[in-house]
Image (cartoon, helix red, strand yellow):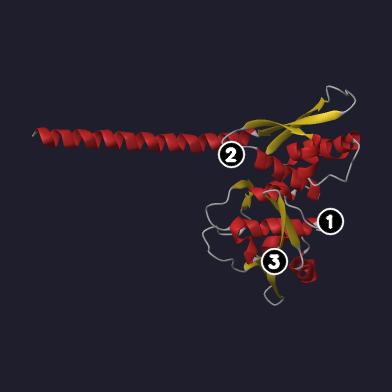
Amino acid sequence: MKDLLIKEPNEFATARFEEDFSIIELRIFKYMLSNVNKKDRHFEMIEFKASDLIKLFKFKSNNFYNLMRKLSNKLIGRVIHIKKNNKLESFALYTKSETCKDKNLYQLKFNDDLKPYLLGKNNEYFIYYISNILNLKTKQLIRIYTYLVKILPHNKNEYTIKLTIEKLREDLNLEDKYRQFKFLKAFVLEKAKEEITKKTDLIFDYECLRDEKDKRKVKYIVLKITRKPQNKIEQKNIKEEVFVNKDKVCNMFKKTRMIIKNETED
């Protein structure tokens, strides 16, 4: 199955879901994002083919229909909480679902209230392939990966950013978890460093900076994000192609000027 490109709004990197929002629901949400056409004026029903999802999510084929039927009611009731201009906006994610057992199809539609985020050219978004999140086994790892992708500028292969620990906790929805930094480091940062570097297109590392007044306390964290070499090659090829096309245009323009000049002189 072809790898799917996800264009995710910047605001979704720090958006929040209910605590019981499952990893299967999160993957379905990402699959939905990969099927949105930003040129559309309205959302259409997005179709899930059983064969595609079985391959993509490694479902057992005999459980697909029952799984989607059970998820249907939960999905319709799901809410996304988005931070915007120091406010927290809450929206229903979906407004309609259909399950067709005979054709092994499932259909789902985004809530129209999300159009300002998902449709049109004015919203800013970050891009990644769905394959990068399929091997990550927890919601937390997927959230951290997408957070890092959002931070990394699209025109850079390496980037570092310094954040307070409080800011990192807020962005990752960890204000009330792992209150002691040693637990945050062991169960979140070290796990993310290992899993994201091993299973995605990014290399992730970090450095802890202690409070100058209280050396026992870690006050800042420096996130270090690097694209893996294969992605650098892909970007280099894109840039070279642009430069080649630019040279062709320049040469054509020079030839055109010479022709016009010769015709004028004649």
- Name the residue carrying label 2: 154
Foreground mark, 1 or 2, reads 1
In space, the residues marked 3 and 2 are separated at their CA atoms by: 30 Å
- Name the residue carrying label 1: 19
Say what amino acid the circle numbered 3 marks: Tyr
Q: Kindly identify the residue that appears in the image at 39 percent across and 38 percent down.
A: 245
Say what amino acid the circle numbered 2 marks: His
Frontmost residue, 39 versus 198: 39
In space, the residues marked 1 and 2 are separated at their CA atoms by: 31 Å
Q: Earlier in the sequence, mark 1 or mark 2?
A: 1
Say what amino acid the circle numbered 1 marks: Glu
Q: Position of residue 242 (x, y in %)?
A: 44, 37
Identify the disc placed on residue 94. 3
**Screen quadrant of the N terminus:** bottom right
To which quarter of the image does residue 99 belong?
Answer: bottom right
Q: Kindly identify the residue that appears in the image at 22 percent across and 35 percent down.
A: 257
Looking at the image, is 243 positioned above or below residue 134?
Answer: above
Q: Position of residue 244 (x, y in %)?
A: 41, 35
To which quarter of the image does residue 181 belong?
Answer: top right
Q: Quick one: SS at disc 1?
A: loop
Q: Residues within 10 Å of mark 2 (few under 14, many from 20)?
A: few
Q: Quick one: SS at disc 3?
A: strand
In space, the residues marked 1 and 3 are separated at their CA atoms by: 18 Å
Q: Kindly identify the residue that appears in the image at 71 percent across and 52 percent down.
A: 87
